[in-house]
Image (cartoon, coloured by chain):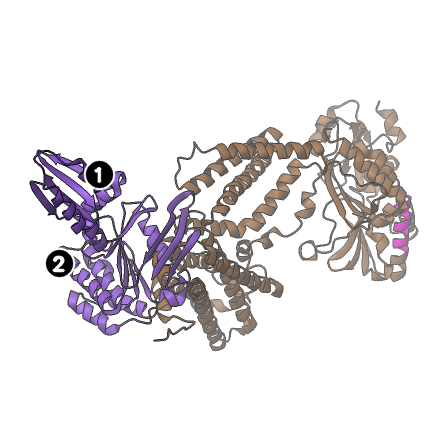
């Protein structure tokens, strides 16, 4: 379990992370969404034990991360720009990692290389950006970490590889309860992967939700009445948003689906539909004004 | 699976080897050319070999190459070794790995040290081999090889750890390299600059006294530059080793505290940035003052100009480095604050004058040394033996010295050059106080202004005994004694007999005690010189002044006087004229020109009478107050000699002849 409690991190006078708290359960995939400069990378580097926070605690399984050797052996950090030692081949990088990560699995390393059809004996720096990232994934997954930290991992991958990588990640989470923190500036990119989402903006977490719960909790409803919408209905529902298209009213309502349906049916509408809501719509309505301000990061 | 914790990570070493191994190889190849190959070239050429002489040490072989490698390789290695710390992705990568910072540091720093030791060790081994194979014992011994290897290794390790230490404080490799060199010359540089500038700022600051320490020993770089000339002492090598260990530990300490995000920052620790900025400003200010002071002959206007320009340039340069941009002209608020702070500080120092006006009180002083040079302590390694005057303890004398000192202090504004006919001299005071403190001052003064003070001090027996070494030796120590005339024939006598030596020394001691201050200032130049030789590089130099009545008498009695003095017979004639400052007193007086001018002048006295010439020879001198000029023409020599008379010593016949 990853616990970040009241953490702040300042660079000179600029506060990149402001008093953030978040918890990630073991075996969960946590998506950290934020625009450029929101503090994603800083938060991730704090979790990877690279930076040291000025305030608060960053811990995994109740142990602080910074300079904690035994813990870091089970944590693998994949930066937004994968880094490889100069002039190294994937094979040499593998040996390098093997000497640091006791859970390193040589067999899996070879398997993954084969599966990705990657030449282990070619210098990584001669690879294209996409191939470098694949090499980085192979190395990361071969280290068999208990916690995997991915900073913008899908950049530069084509849809096929993206799918492949996602499947591998989900498989590891399912097989051995690996915990993943994954960051992105685009919600759509990772919404099919994550079970939890946190939105970070200007160094602060705006919202943290479990996706299933979120989806069950908010509904888009289309209704039409002969004599207009009854007032008592407007008062009794938790309406986040109302829109009128001709005689049809579009409502975004929070609450239990059955309860809402029952209440509306009582008022005998001419038209009544419950429509599916995309994740980005949920966020925009959920977050109200801020939602519109940061629309670009969640769409 | 339990995590295996080993002290040594092979893969990390492999990476270090792959990225920086080339530096050690270059070092090795360079040394190969400088030593083994050079030796093969020298000692296998039969035609040349008999010219070759033994070397002082192995640094003499291609020293330019050796010095170049020694100055560059360790610092280059330190920069490349810790390159990973200065590049953001590399720094993030390395510190995301499950390995503690100290372990990373030890791996890199120790690998660097091995990379410096190994090439030297191999070269030393191959030189040992050559030494045996070519029988090079004639040129150097095996202990020379050990010394060479030890000195090279210890110096290079010191330079390397200095580079590492600086690397911990900066986040840019280029800055690391530049700051390392600055750091290495800093101790010598700051000492020089502080002493020099205090001399400008504080009236009486004895910078020459402090500067007698060897500046070149204060920096490993200057020490390295002199390796072929000077054999380092054992304690110096130990000091290098100790400093290396110290820098290593301090680097580790900083590494553990360094924030990884500070790569690409010029100064990694925010608190050090302030120090860096104002440190640079301060140093360049001192350099500016020193430069313009030196070039413009200590003109106050130029010195101030130098301070201002130096501070501005230094501040802007530091700001440029910190901001990593040259467009820093808008950020001069700190400079203004600095300027005001320095100005206030200087005004306070000048106004209070705590330092300048501090003449110790009579009851505080235990003893005092008054000398005309700040170099009062022996430094046998540089100048052979040097007599240190004994401190004066008599109350009257201390009082007199204090009065002199007080007068000089109160004359701060007096131009010591004005009206002085003698170049300014040094007055050096070293008080030892009853509480153990020392008060040391040095002034450039015109002695004429303080004649009365000096007279009373100099004519006291205590001062004479304290300041003349001749009172502090016993005749038995003296090996021999030589008295040499200063005339054209340069004849001399050497005295070896212990009894005679004893008599002469007694005579000199008595004559010195009798001689007046005026005579001791007036005579000297052109009088016969006495050299009392105690051992090879320890001798006492005196002049046989006409005022040394006893010694002159002794030499006359022994019939030696003609051998040690210029006799009237050697002088063909003497021209005597009125002294004119412009013509007769400059550093470049042309005696022949003066003699030529005197030929045409009516009021010039030409003396040919041997008796009068003898009187002239016994009365002419140098002194401070010139009245007449004497040009001496010798038999059988083209070049005349110039001497002066003051009022007191001028013979009557001259006074009568020239009005």
Q: Is residue B496 above or below residue B267?
A: below
Name the residue rendered at 86%, 37% in the picture: B455
For label 1, the SS is helix
- Quadrant position of residue A171: bottom left
Note whether A164 is above or below B348 in the view shown: below
Residue B221 x %, y %: 52, 54
Q: Which residue is mark 2?
A: A160
Residue at image point 18% right, 40% down: A233
Question: Is residue B326 rendered to the left or right of residue B154?
Answer: left
Q: Nearer the viewer, residue A169 or B366?
A: A169
Residue A164 in view here = yes
Q: Where are the magenta residues, as a range?
A: B503-519
Residue A34 image position (x, y, % from top left): 27, 47
* Callout 1–callout 2 Cβ contact below 8 Å: no
Which quadrant: the N terminus of chain B? bottom left
Which quarter of the image is occupied by the C terminus of chain B?
A: top right
Residue B570 is one of the magenta-drawn residues: no
Chain for colour brown: B
For residue B261, above or below residue B649: below
Image coordinates for residue B206, horizontal then vertical, percent: 70, 43
Q: Chain of mark 1?
A: A
Q: Is residue B64 visible?
A: no
The answer for which chain carries disc 2 is A
Q: Colour of chain A?
A: purple
For label 1, the residue is A235
The main secondary structure of the magenta stretch is helix
Q: Nearer the viewer, mark 1 or mark 2?
A: 1
Picture quadrant of residue B516: top right
Asked whether B107 or B235 is in front, the reply is B107
What is the secondary structure assignment of the residue under circle 2?
Answer: helix
Residue B508 lies in the magenta stretch: yes
Q: Residue at x 61, y 66 (%)?
A: B234
């Amino acid at each position: 379990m990853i616990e970040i409690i009241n953490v702040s991190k300042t660079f000179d006078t600029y506060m990149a992370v402001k008093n953030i708290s978040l918890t990630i359960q073991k075996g969960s995939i946590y998506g950290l969404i934020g625009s450029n400069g929101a503090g994603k990378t800083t938060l991730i580097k704090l979790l990877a034990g690279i930076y040291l926070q000025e305030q608060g605690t960053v811990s995994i399984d109740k142990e602080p991360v910074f300079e904690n050797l035994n813990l870091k052996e089970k944590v693998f950090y994949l930066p937004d720009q994968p880094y490889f030692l100069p002039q190294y081949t994937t094979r040499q990088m593998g040996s390098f990692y093997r000497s640091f990560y006791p859970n390193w699995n040589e067999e899996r390393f070879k398997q993954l290389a084969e599966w990705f059809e990657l030449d282990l004996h070619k210098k990584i720096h001669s690879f294209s950006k996409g191939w470098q990232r694949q090499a980085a994934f192979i190395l990361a997954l071969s280290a068999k970490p208990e916690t995997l930290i991915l900073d913008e991992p899908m950049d530069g991958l084509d849809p096929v590889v993206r799918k492949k990588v996602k499947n591998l990640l989900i498989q590891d989470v399912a097989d051995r309860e690996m915990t993943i923190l994954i960051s992105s500036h685009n919600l759509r990119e990772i919404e099919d992967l994550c079970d939890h989402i946190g939105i970070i903006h200007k160094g602060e977490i705006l919202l943290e939700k479990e996706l299933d719960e979120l989806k069950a909790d908010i509904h888009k409803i289309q209704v039409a009445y002969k004599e207009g919408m009854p007032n008592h209905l407007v008062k009794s529902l938790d309406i986040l948003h109302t829109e009128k298209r001709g005689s049809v009213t579009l409502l975004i309502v929070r609450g239990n689906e059955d309860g809402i349906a029952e209440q509306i049916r009582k008022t005998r509408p001419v038209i009544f539909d419950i429509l599916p809501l995309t994740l980005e719509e949920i966020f925009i309505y959920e977050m109200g004004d801020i939602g519109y301000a940061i629309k670009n990061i969640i769409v | 699976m339990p995590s295996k914790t080993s002290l040594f990570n092979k893969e990390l070493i492999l990476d270090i080897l792959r990225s920086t191994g080339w530096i050690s190889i270059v070092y090795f190849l360079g040394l190969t050319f400088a030593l083994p190959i050079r030796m093969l070239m020298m000692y296998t050429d039969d035609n040349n070999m008999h010219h070759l002489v033994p070397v002082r040490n192995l640094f003499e072989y291609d020293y330019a190459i050796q010095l170049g490698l020694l100055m560059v390789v360790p610092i280059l290695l330190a920069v490349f070794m810790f390159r990973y710390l200065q590049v953001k992705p590399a720094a993030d990568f390395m510190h995301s790995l499950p390995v503690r910072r100290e372990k990373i540091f030890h791996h890199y720093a120790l690998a660097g040290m091995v990379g410096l030791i190994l090439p030297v060790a191999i070269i030393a081994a191959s030189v040992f081999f050559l030494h045996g194979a070519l029988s090079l014992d004639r040129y150097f011994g095996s202990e020379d090889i050990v010394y060479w290897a030890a000195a090279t290794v210890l110096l290079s390790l010191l330079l390397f750890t200095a580079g590492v230490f600086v690397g911990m404080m900066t986040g840019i490799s280029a800055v690391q390299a530049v700051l390392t060199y600055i750091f290495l010359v800093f101790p010598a540089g700051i000492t020089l600059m502080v002493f020099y500038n205090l001399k400008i700022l504080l009236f009486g600051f004895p910078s020459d006294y402090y500067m007698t320490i060897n500046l070149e020993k204060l920096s490993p770089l200057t020490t390295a530059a002199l390796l072929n000339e000077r054999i380092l002492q054992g304690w110096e090598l130990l000091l290098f080793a100790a400093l290396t260990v110290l820098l290593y530990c301090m680097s580790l300490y900083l590494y553990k505290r360094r924030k990884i995000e500070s790569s690409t920052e010029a100064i990694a620790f925010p608190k050090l940035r302030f120090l860096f900025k104002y440190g640079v400003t301060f140093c360049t200010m001192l350099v500016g003052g020193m430069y313009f002071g030196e070039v413009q002959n200590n003109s106050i206007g130029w010195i101030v100009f130098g301070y201002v320009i130096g501070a501005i340039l230094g501040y802007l340069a530091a700001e440029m480095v910190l901001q990593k941009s040259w467009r820093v002209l808008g950020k001069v608020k700190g400079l203004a604050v600095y300027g005001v702070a320095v100005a206030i500080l200087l005004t306070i120092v000048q106004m209070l004058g705590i330092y300048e006006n501090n003449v110790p009180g009579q009851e505080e002083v235990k003893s005092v040394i008054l000398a005309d040079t700040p170099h009062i302590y022996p430094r046998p390694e540089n100048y052979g033996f040097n007599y240190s005057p004994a401190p004066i303890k008599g109350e009257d004398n201390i009082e007199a010295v204090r009065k002199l000192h007080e007068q000089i202090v109160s004359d701060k504004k007096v131009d010591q050059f004005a009206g002085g006919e003698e170049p300014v001299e040094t007055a050096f005071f070293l008080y030892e106080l009853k509480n153990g403190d020392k008060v040391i001052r040095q002034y450039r003064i015109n002695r004429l202004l303080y004649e009365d003070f000096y007279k009373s001090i100099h004519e006291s027996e205590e001062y004479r005994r304290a300041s003349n070494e001749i009172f502090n030796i016993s005749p038995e120590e003296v090996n021999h004694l030589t008295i040499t005339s200063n005339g054209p024939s340069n004849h001399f006598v050497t005295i070896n007999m212990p009894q005679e030596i004893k008599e002469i020394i007694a005579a000199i001691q008595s004559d010195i005690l009798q001689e007046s201050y005026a005579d001791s200032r007036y005579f000297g130049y052109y009088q016969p010189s006495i050299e009392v030789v105690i051992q090879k590089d320890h001798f006492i130099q005196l002049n046989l002044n006409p005022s040394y009545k006893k010694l002159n008498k002794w030499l006359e009695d022994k019939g030696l006087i003609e051998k040690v003095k210029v006799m009237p017979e050697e002088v063909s004639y003497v021209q005597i004229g009125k002294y004119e400052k412009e013509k007769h007193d400059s550093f470049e007086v042309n005696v022949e020109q003066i003699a030529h001018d005197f030929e045409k002048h009516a009021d010039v006295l030409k003396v040919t009478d041997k008796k009068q010439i003898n009187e002239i020879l016994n009365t002419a001198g140098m002194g401070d107050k010139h009245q007449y000029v004497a040009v001496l023409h010798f038999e059988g020599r083209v070049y005349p000699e110039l001497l002066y008379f003051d009022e007191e010593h001028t013979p009557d016949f001259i006074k009568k002849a020239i009005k």
